[in-house]
Image (cartoon, helix red, strand yellow):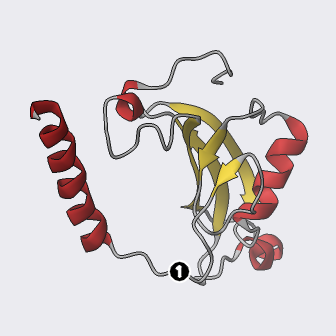
């Protein structure tokens, strides 16, 4: 697991779109549903919101695309927020002042940076912002 003393990943430090805004980010976490076939008596609790039986797993990933945390075994009906709470209760430690990126299925807390609820993000605008950011960065270098 990353510690508070670990340097900022180069994927953040070398990208003007991310630096210095995400300098305290350790990585990203998300849940994933893995298909399974439980015994008939257990199927209702393993049935997820999309209708198939699965195991909900929590994965943490660094910016160098390495898995740094996994928690498996939860029923498919369990929410990402519930699994995250269990992970924090047992062995998922986030150093003070640091955080992970997560989607809107996770709680608002000091360990996670999640999107604003009710805000619609447009990927095309984000892509154009990257071009403007890099262009402005390059212009500052040559002026």
Taking 23 as reference, is 141 left or right?
left
Viewport quadrant of the N terminus: top right
Q: Using residue 16 as the reference point, say whether residue 44 is left or right of it.
A: right
Question: Which corner quadrant of the image does residue 39 belong to?
Answer: bottom right
Q: Secondary structure at mark 1?
A: loop
Please report the residue visible at 56 percent of the width from the left and 38 percent of the height from the top. Answer: 25
Residue at 67 percent of width and 35 percent of height: 98
- Front-most of residues 142 and 130: 142
Q: How many marks?
A: 1
Vertical comparison of 121 with 111: above or below: below
- Which residue ends up furthest to the left in the rendered image? 142
Residue 64 location in percent, x, y? 40, 29
- Residue 86 percent across, percent down from the top left: 85, 50
Q: Is residue 64 visible?
A: no
Q: Residues within 10 Å of mark 1 (few under 14, many from 20)?
A: few
Where residue 15 sits, quadrant-wise, is top left
Write down the quadrant of residue 51 in the picture: bottom right
Q: Is residue 45 visible?
A: yes
Q: Tell me the quarter of the image containing the C terminus.
A: top left
The one nearer the camera, 51 or 127, is 127
Residue in the image at 20% along x and 57% along y:
132
Q: Residue at x 76, y 62 (%)?
A: 81
Q: Is residue 25 left or right of residue 107?
A: left
Find disc 1 in the rendering and name its residue. Answer: 119
- Nearer to the camera, 100 or 137: 137
Q: Position of residue 95 (x, y in %)?
A: 75, 29
């Amino acid at each position: 697991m990353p510690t508070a003393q670990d340097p900022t990943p180069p994927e953040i430090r070398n990208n003007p779109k991310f630096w210095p805004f995400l300098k305290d980010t350790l990585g990203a976490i998300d849940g994933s549903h893995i298909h399974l076939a439980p015994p008939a008596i257990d199927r209702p609790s393993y049935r997820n919101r999309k209708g198939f039986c699965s195991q909900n797993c929590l994965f943490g990933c660094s910016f160098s695309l390495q898995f740094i945390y996994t928690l498996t075994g939860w029923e498919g009906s369990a929410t990402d927020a519930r699994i995250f709470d269990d992970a924090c209760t047992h062995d998922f430690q986030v150093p003070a002042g640091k955080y992970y990126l997560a989607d809107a299925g996770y709680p608002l807390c000091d360990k996670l940076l999640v999107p604003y609820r009710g805000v619609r993000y447009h990927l095309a605008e984000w892509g154009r912002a990257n071009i403007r950011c890099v262009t402005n960065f390059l212009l500052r270098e040559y002026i």
